[in-house]
């Protein structure tokens, strides 16, 4: 059926060098900050989503995707069901 025409953005960051015996917590924070900056750039560059596609976009960016906390709550609820609501 061919390509999906869904754009895929990839960004490779600069290497982060951590000296032997370096501060692991500081290195972790440096890595986290670099990854967050990359994510922010990629999300800003991505084409605007509309309609049903908004479910893939976080609310902070105008979408309807659940927060990680909401997703965890939904998953917990689904796992604790005693009856299948679709086949009852």
Image: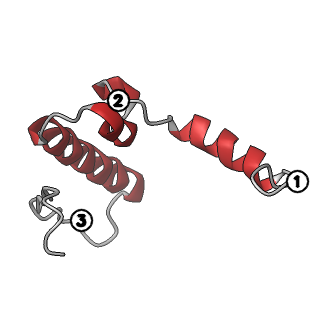
* Residue sitting at x 67%, y 42%: 74
Q: Is 80 located above or below residue 43 in the figure?
A: below
Q: Nearer the viewer, residue 44 or 23?
A: 44
User: Label 1 to label 2, Cα distance in Å?
Assistant: 31 Å
Q: Is residue 82 left or right of residue 79?
A: right
Secondary structure state at the residue bearing disc 2: loop
Q: Which mark is residue 18?
A: 3
Q: Is residue 40 left or right of residue 26?
A: left
Q: Is 50 located above or below residue 76 in the figure?
A: above
Quadrant hosting residue 18 = bottom left
Q: Are marks 1 and 2 in contact (CB under 8 Å)?
A: no
Quadrant hosting residue 44 = top left
Secondary structure state at the residue bearing disc 1: loop
Q: Which mark is residue 83?
A: 1
Q: Is residue 18 left or right of residue 73?
A: left
The percent position of residue 17, horizontal first and vertical second, equals 18, 65
The percent position of residue 52, horizontal first and vertical second, equals 35, 37
Q: Which comes before the other along the chain, label 1 or label 2?
A: 2
Residue placed under numbered mark 2 in the picture = 63
Q: Residues within 10 Å of mark 1 (few under 14, many from 20)?
A: few
* Residue sitting at x 31%, y 24%: 62
* Residue sitting at x 36%, y 43%: 56
């Amino acid at each position: 059926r061919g390509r999906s025409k869904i754009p895929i953005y990839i960004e490779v960051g600069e290497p982060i060098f951590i000296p032997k015996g370096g501060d692991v917590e500081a290195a972790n924070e440096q890595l986290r900050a670099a990854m967050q900056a990359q994510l922010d750039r990629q999300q800003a560059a991505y084409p605007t989503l509309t309609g049903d596609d908004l479910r893939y976009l976080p609310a902070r960016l105008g979408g309807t995707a659940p927060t990680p906390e909401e997703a965890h709550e939904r998953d917990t609820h689904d796992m604790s069901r005693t009856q299948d609501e679709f086949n009852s």
